[in-house]
Amino acid sequence: MSSRFRRATARAIARAIALTVGVMTGVTGIGCSRPAPTPVATLRVCADPNNLPFSNARGEGFENQIAELVGRELHERVEYTWWAQRRGFVRNTLKAGTCDLIVGVPNHYQLTATTQPYYRSTYVFVTRDGPNADIQSLDDPRLRTIKIGVQLIGDDFANTPPAHALSQRGIIQNVRGYTVYGDYRQPNPPARIVDAVAKGDIDVAIVWGPLGGYFATREAVPLHVTPVSPQQALPALPFTFDISMGVRRGDSLLQKRLNAILAARRPAVDSILRTYGVPRVDLPRTVSMARLP
Amino acid sequence: MSFRPSLTHRAPIALFLVVLGCKERVIEKHPSLEAARTTVLPTPAGDMRANPEPDDGQWIRPAKDYSSSRYSALDQITTSNVAGLKLVMTSSTGIFRGQEAAPIVVNNTMYVVTPFPNNLIAYDLTKPGFPIKWTFKPAPETAAQGVACCDVVNRGAVYVDGELVYNTLDNHTIAVDAQTGLKRWDTKMGDINLGETMTMAPLAVNHKVIVGNSGGEMGVRGWIAALDVASGAVVWKAYHTGPDADVLIGPGFKPFYSKDRGVDLGVKSWPGDLWKIGGATTWGWISYDPKLNLIYYGTANPGPWNPEQRPGDNKWTSTLFARNPDDGHAVWAYQMTPHDLHDYDGVNENILLDITVNGHPRQVLVHPDRNGYMYVLDRATGEVLSADPFATINSSTGMNVTTGELTTNPAKEPKVGKVVRNICPASPGAKDWQPSAFSPRTGLMYVPHNNLCMDVEATDANYIAGTPYVGMNVKMFAGQGGGGIFSAWDPVARKEVWRIDERFPAWSGALVTGGDVVFYGTMDGWFKAVDARTGKLLWRYQTTSGIIGQPVSFRAPDGKQYIAVLSGVGGWAGATVAGQLDTRDSSAALGFNNAMHELPKYSQPGGSLYVFALP
């Protein structure tokens, strides 16, 4: 293959990419504005103002970064509706019509329509250096004696997957609960459980990957982050989840535009997630790619 | 002085429609109702209420009297003339969320507490049309809404020593001068940032106001506290989990049953230190017996642990307490639902009666619990004299009064990874907060309650940090006849006397009067008057929203008897409308939505005071 041909091919590919991007912009840009309560070109995002590494009011979370990326692709300015991410969050934000996008929801989340998943993460063990640093299984006998921290959500019959998995194994007396709501006056209340590992209050925390991956690198002592195995404790109790974006049911235009952006800008999204230390256990992408518009 | 209420010009039309409505709709037939119609009820000998108080025509606390009878002796409105009842005044509260409060009437003024932002509105009863005198706006923190469990309700204020005292959603207990509407004191009792809120109506006893917290699901540790009426200073505070010293359990604590005796059970009945965030909040009703000098109230469910994670009785959740109101010390406790599996809080009302049980006069409290049993306890000792099902129950198979133990049904225990169908009662219980009434004239209790069962299914996503929470899939559905029941219960004969089926849970309080008329509201917006002896529908009025408030009766300066109620659907059951939940989402509002999906067809959000009288 001649170098000239190679250059021509490269130019053709570049043109094709430019064309694709152009078409994409056409699809996602002004020509096709979705019905919105205000005519201003804004991307209205529903987010928690105090919940790193996901989001905060200073825009320091990876969901803030991804929202900015999406805003740039849509040529829309990102505006936030802030609400603590607890019961009533969706009702008081997305469903109340004050914003149109939740950056991270479980795929097929029942309160919203969801995009194709853009990452898959897992619950992780967070441990200090030392004898427990290599724990990787819920069936490790050490879990019967060392102090374990889990997060609690506290609704009727439902709790975090690790809380359920431990009680099913009869591991109860040595478990300490950290309410996921925590003290909202403190920064990033869900991070207290990782602080507790660093301080030695507990020997191991079992937390959602993005939380563990981010805070483990920000404590005064080195911490280890290990995906929980098995990945599923019961047919209905998995430890890995696909995360998508959430929009109002019926807002299929925004949903399609987001799917297009997530497909086209996947490397940029991946790069943001990598920067924040999000542990990834993504499945092969063939299925989700094939179904993109 | 002539008294001319406004809006009377509207009344004839409304009345016309109402009368038509009554004629075309015959009350639902029910075997027990038919039986009641053929039985002439004996009028009970003497007033069965504990420490009956003479009726001054006012309504100074939500439960009317210390025995929580919600009985008004006023008798101008009777079963014979109630069909002529007319709307004399209506006024918007300005807040279209669930209106659970009882209007308070004292010194020719009526006071209403709105849902969040918890405004206190005073109406002048000396002027035609009862105009607004002043509105006190406490301006609670907006963020309180984000942590409130189930809508942003408030159950009302209490009048004491020239002031109205009530709680705000962001945990302030506030005293407002009844004349001027100016704040006298304001005590911060908790923090919304910790998941804590306050929704209950205080009770004033011995120059103290007793208050408690809400938010068990958020990892809050439940407590009850007394504040000085004059200063707002906290006099005592008792927790409902933890060591005896925290629970104010001392040498004077004498529980009737051995299962409730022991040292530091609030710690020992939990694994590890789970009690520290164990729930057992105090968001319901408090009664008082001045002779025994004891207050009575129940605690809420355990939280936020799932049941298999908290083996043990989890004391003192779902428990009835008797305490000395002066120092807060517990005198007895009885745990109705140890190791609660179904969210059966124990916070419902306790009606204090003096009745004959097995031939002996007993001082009792009657408590219709969420777990479906109508408990009758000796209120001096805490002994359970009887516990009879007043609704469909399959989550337990019986209550042993000798041991005080509830026999639960293992087949109906919710478990992760398992689908359990048809659990009755559902989480809101056979009866939730909606308070009953008792008439000394009929000897009957009037009990608004639920008729709901549920399926509990595991879901593949419980909680994932950084994403909005997805709960376990709980689907509630209405039982036969509809989602609600309004029934009359004979506490001596221990049986239902009549019942009315309702489409939706009967989520309003009950009122009974000296005219033998019972008033209650429905979530599809009807305000109803029925015959206290037969349950026969005598009158009804369609308000603009569903009713979940507490009706009251009072005498205005013109000497006439009035009936007042707030309309405005909401609360847990009404969140479908008030919170604008998506009716396709069956697990929203903790699964209640499934049972309520038709509600938006019948009720719009609202928030209005309605006052009725005879022409």
Image (cartoon, coloured by chain):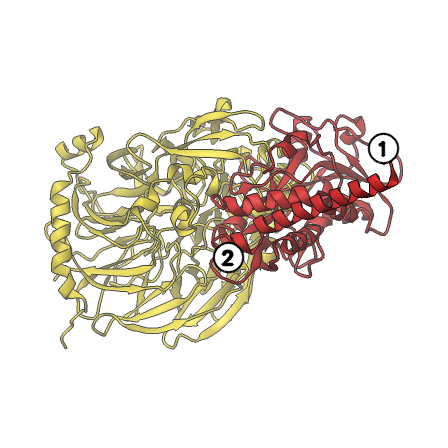
Observer-nearest of B583 and B248? B583
Amino acid type at image mark 2: Thr
Return the x and y of residue B524 as percentages of the image width and height: 29, 46
Picture quadrant where residue A76 is located: bottom right
Q: Colour of chain A?
A: red
Kindly identify which residue carries mark 1: A134
Q: Does the image show residue A82?
A: no
Q: Is residue B347 left or right of residue A50?
A: left
Q: Does A80 sit above or below residue B182?
A: above
Instruction: Work out which quarter of the rendered image holds the N terminus of chain B and state it.
Output: bottom left
Kindly identify which residue carries mark 2: A98
Closer mark to the observer between disc 2 and disc 1: 2
Return the x and y of residue A232 as percentages of the image width and height: 68, 27
Q: Give the SS element for disc 1.
A: loop
Q: Is residue A246 left or right of residue B51?
A: right
Q: Does the image show residue B71?
A: yes
Gap in Å between the C-alphas at discs 2 and 1? Answer: 46 Å
Amino acid type at image mark 1: Asp
Q: Does A276 sit above or below residue A39?
A: above
Chain label for disc 2? A
Q: Residues within 10 Å of mark 2 (few under 14, many from 20)?
A: some
Residue A264 badge: none
Observer-nearest of A188 and A185? A188
N-term-proximal mark, 2 vs 1:
2
Q: Residues within 10 Å of mark 1 (few under 14, many from 20)?
A: some
Instruction: Work out which quarter of the rendered image holds the C terminus of chain B and state it.
Output: bottom left
Observer-nearest of A265 and A242? A265
Q: Which residue: 48% across, 56% down? A: A36
Observer-nearest of B79 and A50? A50
Q: Is residue B195 left or right of residue A203?
A: left
Q: Colour of chain B?
A: yellow
Q: Give the SS element for disc 2.
A: loop
